[in-house]
Image (cartoon, rainbow, N blue to C red):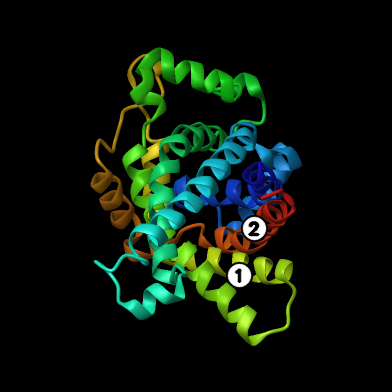
Amino acid sequence: MAGVFSGATKLSVGHPFDTIKVRMQTAEYGRFRGPLDCLLQTIRKEGIFGLYKGASPPLVGWMVMDSIMLGSLSVYRRLLLENVWTNRMFVDEETIKKNTLPSVGHGFAGMAAGATVSFVAAPVEHVKARLQIQYAAKKADRLYSGPIDCTKKLLKHHGIPGLWHGLSATLIFRSFFFFWWGSYDLLSRWFKDHTKMSTPAINFWAGGLSAQVFWLTTYPTDVVKQRVMVDPLGGGLNDGTRRFPRWKDAARAVYREGGYRAFWRGFVPCFLRAFPANAAALVAFEGVMRSLPE
């Protein structure tokens, strides 16, 4: 239940930033001079709702994904505490007496939760990305009329593997949840010990800052993931010829286009989005968790 509130909050705040990010990551060089130009072009040609293209699948998807991610995160935290950090086979007596999961344990729990939710996230993000790169203002000129149409066409022409195209890239990307949840615990502890902020304020600041730590460590893998997901699948879909049969092929293509800098295209809107979207989402999640009966 808390994850549903978290996902809805995250999408309403962050989706316009995400649209600009995906377009910056996947557009041919020269189409946009920068994120601001991308934003202005999108609004001028497609209206304000152009920023919310592809929002329907993640609206449902983020609620489901955050429920799975945050629910599994809580389970993995408990399993690690009970079976590793209070087990004499792995830690000393002093650690056992503390009976708390250290920040590195939260990191491992986050990495496991990231892998778990990837199996739900991959098809949602795949459909979202394909809708976000449709630049035509008129629906009649687009390959997909909406998320349902996109899903049907992917399943019709490429089956289940087609819908889950990009799963391996998603697993690589979400393994970096280690840094997100490890830093979230570290920052939460620091704010609690060194400030007089309220619990919701700590959730807000720790949530926003830890999300930025996450994106600073993982952004290049997200660029490659997006390239994999928007790569033409060909066949009956008739959307072009596939370019990247493997993850490393997409990574090499990104590097050939602009060296290491190419792996950071679209980083500014992503970084700007990370703080408010995730800060608000974690305030919502932690607040609902505190209000629910134990």
Quarter of the figure that contains the N terminus? top right
Q: Residue at x 47, y 17 (%)?
A: 153
Q: CA distance from mark 1 to mark 2?
A: 9 Å
List x then y, in percent, for residue 209: 58, 70
Q: Is residue 148 left or right of residue 251?
A: right
Which residue is at the front of the view, 146 or 265?
146
Callout count: 2
Q: Secondary structure at mark 2?
A: helix
Residue identifier under label 2: 282
67 is higher (above) or lower (below) than 74: above
The amino acid pointed to by label 1 is: Ala
List x then y, in percent, for residue 171: 35, 46
Q: Residue at x 62, y 58 (%)?
A: 278
Q: Are marks 1 and 2 in contact (CB under 8 Å)?
A: yes
Residue identifier under label 1: 206
List x then y, in percent, for residue 292: 71, 49
